[in-house]
Image (spheres, grey):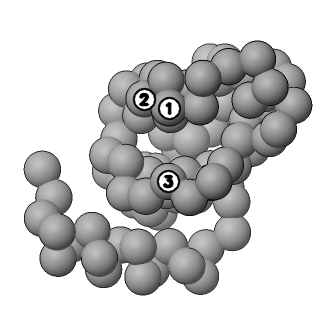
Amino acid sequence: MITTKQVAELRSQAMALKPAAWIGKAGIHDTAVAEIRKQLKKRRLVKVKFLNTFLEGHDKKQQVIDLVHRCDATLVQQVGNMVVLYK
């Protein structure tokens, strides 16, 4: 579990990041999860963007929770369709 102070620092670092992965029409599939895990291992802090084409028929909160569990990561921040994960 990360502390509030650590979350603040991670949010600050995430501001400079560009999205490392995009979740589109295909959804949260194994290839996307594998790529995000690879990026987390390499960088430890990753920004992921959910495209509107994916979110139209899905509950955003539930999809974020699913992504966090499948990537075995910690949710740092969610702003709009952008999510920041930490491992």
Q: Is mark 3 on a helix, strand or loop?
A: strand
Q: Which numbered disc flags the more N-terminal residue, 3 or 1? A: 1
Q: What element carries label 1?
A: helix
Above or below residue 36? Residue 47 is: below
Give the alpha-carbon distance from disc 2 to disc 3, as whole Å: 11 Å
Q: Residue at x 61, y 73 (%)?
A: 17
Point out which mark residue 5 bears.
none
The reply, left or right, for residue 33 in relation to residue 74 is right
Tell me if residue 42 can be seen: no
Residue 72 drawn at (x, y percent): 34, 32
Question: Badge 3: how crowded within 10 Å, few (<14), some, or many (20+)?
Answer: some
Give the alpha-carbon distance from disc 2 to disc 1, as whole Å: 6 Å
- Give the labeled residue for mark 2: 65
Q: Do the residues labelled 2 and 3 touch (CB within 8 Å)?
A: no
Which corner quadrant of the image does residue 9 belong to?
bottom left
- Give the labeled residue for mark 3: 78
Of 60 and 6, which appears nearest the observer? 60
Q: Residue at x 82, y 38 (%)?
A: 52
Residue 46 drawn at (x, y percent): 52, 57
- Give the labeled residue for mark 1: 61
Residue 86 drawn at (x, y percent): 37, 54
Question: Badge 1: how crowded within 10 Å, few (<14), some, or many (20+)?
Answer: few
Looking at numbered disc 2 in the image, what kind of residue is underneath it?
Ile
Above or below residue 10? Residue 35 is: above
Of 44 and 68, which appears nearest the observer? 68
Q: Which numbered disc flags the more N-terminal residue, 2 or 3? A: 2
Q: Which residue is drawn at 55% across and 79% down?
A: 15
The reply, left or right, for residue 40 in relation to residue 59 is left
Looking at numbered disc 1 in the image, what kind of residue is underneath it?
Lys
Q: Residue at x 55, y 26 (%)?
A: 63
Looking at numbered disc 3 in the image, what kind of residue is underneath it?
Gln
Give the alpha-carbon distance from disc 3 to disc 1, as whole Å: 9 Å
